[in-house]
Amino acid sequence: MVAGAPLSASADFIGDSKASLETRNYYFNRDFRQVGAAQNKTEEWAQGLILRYESGYTRGPVGVGVDAIGLLGIKLDSSPDRTGTGLLKSDREAPHRAQDEYGEVGVTGKIKVSDNTLKVGTLIPKLPVAFSNDSRLLPQTFRGGWLNSTEIDNLSVDLGRLDRVNLRNSSDYEAMAVYNGVSRNIRLGRHLDSEKFNFGGATYKWSPDLSTSYYYGGLEDIYKQHYLTLNHVWNVTKGQALKSDVRFARSVDDGESNVDNRALQAMFTYSLGGHAFGLGYQRMDGDTGFANINGTDAYLVNLVQINDFGNQDEKSWQARYDYNFAALGIPGLTFMTRYISGDDVVVRGRSGAGKEWERDSELGYVIQSGPLKNLGIRWKNASMRSNFTSDIDENRLILTYTVALW
């Protein structure tokens, strides 16, 4: 029995493991509509490869496992006057030139005791206070430790610390900073970045259709954030439902910064057959705009293709329409369009409030059967206009294919 124990343990470790390879072919074009500017557009084409491996756990009261991810980005087309799409890594010696390739390998050790799992190493969090960005060629990754517990029915608890971030177009881990673009109007003191982001929170599912959560996130010496969410689905009748997504975030300084923001948001979506109609509202109050780790997606209902409408004092609304062509007998084909308008932005150094709007459309198709099953193609088009930053027209064409290796 003793001699056979290692084989029994490794059977779960190996037998429950899985691996997949995802390929992304990504074309990105952003026109700033600025005649005579030093750079009036960004345009690049690249190939991404994402290899994922997840082991099972060894048997016994304490299960041990390991996960790994391999990321590789390859330049297909770029030039010094068109860089900056976020697809490719800049060359250290020539910042306006993209490297031919870049990548990383991340390893995560994991320990499982009952329904408690601790992961240490490379992490890709999807939490309200730290939402990894995966909108380009390769996903953003972090380094740290993360404990998740589902010991109590319907309750999921998270606790952890991040100490380094690897941006979506980088292969270097670095200290974390707060995003301070456009009109966030955040002022920093001595601490420009931090090596400690502590987080914790819980989600409770009151019923199959109702859940609430509270999360805390703090970038040491820069900001602290408290985040509340409520999600509810009301099944009106067969084929009809109303989904409610309500969020509130309170961000304050932690040290010498001036971070002070209250973000109230709500998105309501009514679905009817293949149709979905959405209305959203987002309001920023306080001395600054929304606070989030630089490079992450701001967890806001009006985070869209180009903008997130999270500037100081900005009030924005969204109208959205989706259609799933499966209702017409064409599964895999989807369409989305939306319009977002924001105003009352505090723009430093100028009089009058800032205003902006964005219009997005997306058409996607995933092949459902045959030798090319799971091959997906998406076209994303967006236009943004603003009286305090650059106007933008943008197109993205993305081909994806994922194959299970075992």
Image: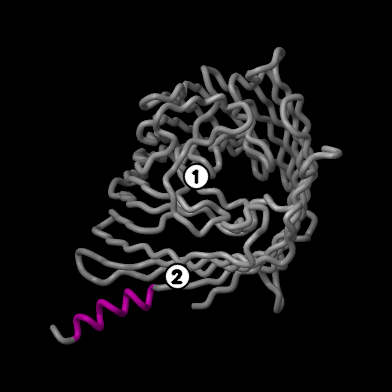
> Left or right of 405: which side holds 41?
right
Magenta stretch, main secondary structure class:
helix
Q: Where's the N terminus, which quadrant?
A: bottom left
Near mark 1 (Cα within 10 A), the count class, few <14, some 14-19 or many ≥20, is some
Q: Which residues are magenta?
A: 4-16
Kindly identify the residue that appears in the image at 53 percent across and 44 percent down: 296
Q: Residue furthest front?
A: 93
Q: How many marks?
A: 2
The residue at the point 75 percent across, 52 percent down is 82
| Kind of residue sitting beneath label 1 | Phe
* Picture quadrant where residue 43 is located: bottom right
Nearer the observer, 282 or 280: 282
Q: Is residue 16 left or right of residue 71?
A: left
Give the residue pinned by disc 2. 53
First reached walking from the N terminus: tag 1 or tag 2? 2
Residue 244 visible in the snapshot: no
What percent of the width, then of the height, locates residue 373? 68, 72
Instruction: Name which residue lies at 63% across and 35% down.
Output: 308
Q: Could you tell me which residue is drawn at 30 percent across and 55 percent down?
A: 118
Picture coordinates of residue 375, whole percent (x, y): 69, 68
Name the secondary structure under disc 2.
strand
- Give the farthest residue toward the left: 2
Is residue 364 rendered to the left or right of residue 6? Answer: right
For the residues labelled 1 and 2, the Cα–Cα distance comes to: 21 Å
The circle on residue 131 is 1
Corner quadrant of residue 78: bottom right
